[in-house]
Amino acid sequence: MRFYLLPIVIFGLAGFGFLARTQQAAPVQQVAQQAAAPLGWQEVKSTDWVREPRRQFTLPGRFLAPLPTKLEGNPGSAPALLLKCAVPRRSGGEGKFRVGAVVVGTLLKIHMVEPQEIKGGPSYYPEVALSYRFDDGKPLEDDWPPRYDKISVEFDKPTFKKILHAHTMLVTLPDKNGHEVRMQFDLPEFPSASAPPTAVPVTSESLPAARTAAQIAEACGVEER
């Protein structure tokens, strides 16, 4: 009996060792997948059900330790910045910034905020408390509205302008359980005012793999500082 049990015990111990190594390697694999994300702004096809044609851009970032444990969809996915801009109605016209968002990928902690002035509308608004910092600047604390999916938050056009002219952006916010989620976005450098402008063709057949900050600014109708 003992001779039959010995191989089973050895096999069981080996299995536990493999499981432990797999669990330890999971965070490393997530970091590797984040590091392999493409750099720069990527243009993707818009799926918005709106009447006006829009262009959509994303910029992948990376999570900082501790990594979030519950991500909606792909567990190894990275956070991203999302931009949606209206296409010019006529040739030579300017695009218009519509909405920007930080896509986290995990359910966020939402609290209700009372507006400073009530004019017959909703008395409270959903917000997500967060802090963000550009480059070596001081952290800024603010409340940003969550999107319909509750795994991302929206930012306005003034914040988008700051993003365009920054090198890095750090964002910290709480998940649904109050655990801190920290993200970093490495931003492409905005060219100097003396650099010649680069036209952004509006096509749907072949979308470029990457966009510069200047091209994004032009596509979204944002002037230089």
Image: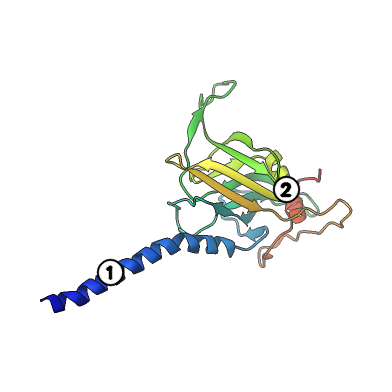
**Location of the N terminus (image quadrant):** bottom left
Question: Quadrant of the rendered structure where residue 200 is?
Answer: bottom right
Quarter of the picture containing the C terminus is top right
Regarding mark 2 in the picture, which secondary structure is present there? loop
Asked if residue 196 is positioned above or below residue 16 in the image, the reply reads: above
Foreground residue among 72 and 175: 175
Q: Residue at x 46, y 42 (%)?
A: 179
How many angstroms separate mark 1 from mark 2 (CA)? 52 Å
Q: Is residue 54 visible?
A: no
Q: 224 or 191: which is nearer to us?
A: 191
**Image x and y of residue 72, in percent:** 45, 53
Asked if 125 appears above or below 204 in the picture, the reply is above
> Looking at the image, which residue sits at the far right?
194
Label 2, residues with CA under 10 Å away: few <14, some 14-19, many ≥20: some
Q: Nearer the viewer, mark 1 or mark 2?
A: 1
Colour scheme in the image?
Answer: rainbow
Amino acid carrying label 1: it is Leu
Lower position in the chain sequence, tag 1 or tag 2 = 1
Residue 189 seen anywhere in this rendered image of the structure: yes
Q: Which residue is mark 2?
A: 166
In the picture provided, is 68 more to the left or to the right than 162? left
Of 158 and 84, the residue lying toward us: 158
Residue at image position (42%, 61%) is: 24
- Position of 225 with respect to 132 (left or right) is right
Q: Which residue is mark 1?
A: 13
Q: Amino acid at mark 2?
A: Ala
The relative height of residue 11 versus residue 60 in the rendered view (above or below) is below
Q: Quadrant of residue 205?
A: bottom right
Q: Residue furthest front?
A: 2
State the image coordinates of residue 28 (x, y, percent, origin top left). 49, 62
User: Which residue is found at the position 73% from the left and 48% from the top?
Assistant: 166
